[in-house]
Structure formats: C-alpha cells, structure tokens
Amino acid sequence: VIEQHRNQPQQITHLIMSHFSALPLIARHNGHPPIDPLPQLMKENKRVVTMQWLVDVVEKQSMEVPWRIAHLPIPHQAPEQARLNIGRIIAVTGFTDSERAAVKYMVESIGAKLMPGVSLHTHLLVAKHPSSEKYEMAREWGVPVVNIQWLVDAYLGQVRADMDQPRYQVAPQNPIEINCGPFTLEHFHDQFKSCLAAWRYPIPCHQPDWDRAVACKHALSQDEHVYPLKKLKLTSSPAPSEEEIAAAHAASAPPHEARQMIVAFEGFDDEFTDVLKRKVRMLGGRVTDEVERCSHLVCIDGKRTVTLLKGIVLGKNLVSASWVNASYDERSFADTFDFFLRDDESERLHGCNFKLSVMRARRAGVFEDCDFYISPSVEPSVEIVANICELGGGVVHEHPPSPARLIECLETDKPYILVATECDMPILKYLTDAGVSVYNTELVFSAAMRQEVDPLPVFTVNPNACQPAPLRLPQCAAAAAAAPAAAAAPAAAGHSSAASTPSRRTSLGQTPPPAAGPAAAAGQPPSTPTQQEFASPQTPRVRPS
C-alpha cells in the first residue's frame, strides 16, 4: 500500500514502527547531543502505529483507531528488560485466528519465537482458557503456563520474574482482552496515551489531496497486475449453459484427445472458475480440484502458491486463462505452448522459468535420491512441505536421523536434508553440534520452483537463535536422550559440514545461477525453451533411464 503511494507529494500522517526506540535520533552540530524526534511528531499530531495495525485495517477495510495492544509500538524499556525474552520459545492456545495474528506479533516483537505446538523445549505457554489439549500437555510436562497478562506486561516492559504469582494465573475469565479498545489502551502506558491523543484530531485534507487520492485509487483498480481477474472478466466470452453443454455432447461425442484433457484451476474466484469449467466441459474435457489428477493447471498468474509448486514438481502443463478462452472460441483445445504460463515479475523474483522448470520435472524428480526430515513447527505445515518433497521424488522420514544414518549418507554421497525452524533446533542439537547444516522451508520451495536444489547460505537456520529450555525429562529418559548427542560428535569427526548438504547435479546440464540468491545476479530468469524442446500436451512424460 505504501509503495503504491511513494511518489505522492503528500504530508506524512502515519508513522509505522515496531519500537519507540527504533526511531533514529536527529543529529545536531556544534557538539550538541542528538534530539529525539518523537515529541515533535506527537506535537504535530502524527499517528504512530505498528505494521499489525496496517494489516488489520486493510483486512477490515476501515481506518479505525488502534484497538489492540499490538497496534501501538513497544514503549521504551530498560536494556535488561528488553533482553529478557530474546530467544525464548513460546506457544499459545485458545485464541481465535484474528487474535492469534496479534498475539504472534507481540511474541515476535519481544524477541521470542512462536511455536505452533508444545514440546519439552517450550519455555512457556500463553493460554486464554484453562481447557485445551496444549494446556493439559504443558501441565503434564512441567511447562509454565501464563495468561495474556504476562504477554502484555512483557510487551510493555513491566513483566515480573515470578510467573507463579496470581496476576499471571490462567482463569476462565481473562484479566484483559486482546481487543481491548482505545480507551483501555490509554491506561496501559504514558506513551500509549500520547499516541492515541493524535487520533482526537482529524487529518487535514484539502481538495487537491482528495482528488489525487481518488485518481490513484482509480488507477490501481485498472492495473491488471494488481487486479488481474478484473480484466479477465471483462474480456472473456460468456460461458455456455448446462443445457447447451448437454445438447452439444448429444449431437456429437467429443474427440478422444479432448477427453484426455483434465483441467484444474488456481487463483480464480468461484464465479469465474465456474465459467472456465463450463467452457472446458463444452469442449469435452474434464475438470478436477486435485493437481495430481490434472493434465493442465490454469493459473491466474505466477505467484508462488502450494498448488503452483505441486504443478511444477509434477511437470503439469501450466497455462493461463487465455488458453481456455481461445480453445472455447475455436471449439477445440489449443496447443499448450502458445499459452504457457508467463509471469516476468515472479520468474525474475524466484530466478526460474516456468517452461524450463516443467521440462526438468518431466525428465527427473528434483528430490530423487534425497532423504528429508521435516520438523514439526515448519510453515505452512509439515504435511504440505512433506507432500511437495514426496511429489518431487524425495523420501520423508518421521524421526530425525541417527548419527550412523548420516555417516552412511555421507559415505554414499546421498543427500539427507534437514528442514526445520529456529523453534525446533533443540531437537536437532546433537546434529548441529557435530557441524550438520539445517535449512528452512525456503530451500524446498525454491528447489521446487527452479527444479534445482541449491543450498545457499541464506537458507540455513541459525542453531543458536533460541535459548535452551530447562530439561524436564525424567532422569532415565534424560540419560537416554543424551546418548545420541554423545555419539554424534565423534561420529561426525573428520567429515566436512558441506558434505551434509544436498549436492544434486544440475538438471539438463545447465549452469546454476550465481550464489547471490535464488534469482540470477543480473535479475533475469533463465532462457525460455523453444517449441521443439518443449513437449506438446499430447506427448507423454518420459524419464531417462
């Protein structure tokens, strides 16, 4: 939103920041100390908010006064108070999806890491109600459980060291609500009160400013890159009715080639998807909601989604909506090559070419001969990441590998890829201590887009990002858990950490892009294959022996 208005010569009305201390000081000359610009901004009635406020008001489509604690920046705190929660692993339970977004912002703002589940490595659980599976699990494992008041105090820099005091005990009735409203926010902190005072004054808006804003909104609404579906609806021909489809099939049976067309859709709303489905059925094709079953995947654009990743990994024909419209106008399915999906911005961003990636996927799975372990806290979920790995030919294991298994992979030059988040690094500590590299999910998604595994340093997870949690295992279980760690160090001695990274050869004999990021250094996607190199829709997928 801000980027779209970067060239507008308007006065600043809102200041977005995470901490009040993040505002840079204004330097002064002649040896005078720097000045804090915040008091002057408050005097000018500038509205100081957080990014979470911007997300919430865009979602509500209404410019409202901050009504959540997460909508105002963290007040000034003492250094020891600000460092208190850095690296802690926190889980939450009992909050709605809307509340969870604000709670996640508060957890990350105090320097902690949000974990989707509860484990023995969790430092504490923030619960809204004393009735949930996570709550019972935390009580059983000895994980401290606190209410939302603890998180509010930590956000304000007023948290008490003792978590067992009544102020932080979970009860059926919460002492404070996430959506507390602006009048309640004023009483939390003096800086909150100063921020909200600016909302008592209207924003001065003159007629030229209003006209400029209306013109900008109109220009954005007509931009096909921002709203691609709007142009498609205006240029597409009407869809046939169910009676017309039945009459056409009764008059003449669809050809065999048309019946082989199984089409799935991605990115369209339900209304336009129904239009495209009826056109495909009119031509004798079939429609499906499962990417695994389709022969063609019709995408609205090249934005990276789970469905698009699956389509690339499976080597599906990725086409735009123009393919369906042109085929319907010609009353026969058009050649895929002429309508293959193209999105220059997305291809430049991810350093890929959709045609080239599909060709690579048809020759060999990008994750063939690769073993994976995926930790429980990865996003969007373990199931989605594991499904992409398996569709690419990889093998996903339920439990972390043993040191002996890693040594076997090192000796046979078989990649074993560990995918985890910072919250789950304690699970793999016995491996990271031995020099084994762990990667985030971006390695999997980037490899699926480009059909090439490239373990760049930017994909590596910091093994020391989180604080170690107190050991809560029974004595016998603790001794058993320490055995893998003791065996990992001598077992991995003499092996380079680079040997544990995937070393898959480059598909099609292409040279990988420079290691400056997923995209090429020049910012250009790989060259597009010619029509002779690209398989037609009727050409079967053939894997080389």
Image (cartoon, helix red, strand yellow):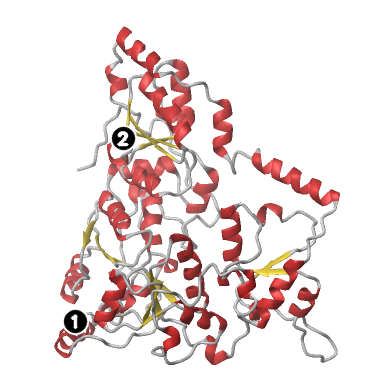
Badge 2 amino acid: Cys
- Place residue 298 in its image quadrant: top left
Q: Mark 1 or 2 closer to N-term?
A: 2
Residue underneath mark 1: 484
Residue 428: give x, y in percent of width and height.
28, 76
Residues 43 and 522: in front is 43
Q: Which circle, 1 or 2, is nearer the viewer?
A: 2
Residue 109: give x, y in percent of width and height.
52, 75
Residue 226: give x, y in percent of width and height.
59, 44
Badge 1 amino acid: Pro
Residue underneath mark 2: 294
Please indicate whether residue 271 sits to the left or right of residue 24 in the image.
Answer: left
Q: Is residue 23 visible?
A: no
Marks 1,2: beta carbons within 8 A: no
Q: Residue at x 54, y 36 (%)?
A: 229
Q: Under tag 2, what secondary structure?
A: loop
Q: Residues within 10 Å of mark 1 (few under 14, many from 20)?
A: some
Image quadrant containing the C terminus: top left
Image quadrant containing the N terminus: bottom right
Residue 476: give x, y in percent of width and height.
14, 88
Report how far apart the C-alphas of labels 1 and 2 lie in the structure: 45 Å
Q: Residues within 10 Å of mark 2 (few under 14, many from 20)?
A: many
- Place residue 377 in its image quadrant: bottom left
State whether residue 523 is above or below residue 460. Answer: above
Q: Under tag 1, what secondary structure?
A: helix
Q: Residue at x 51, y 48 (%)?
A: 346
Residues 226 and 514: in front is 226
State whether residue 59 is above or below residue 315. Answer: below
Residues 433 and 264: in front is 264
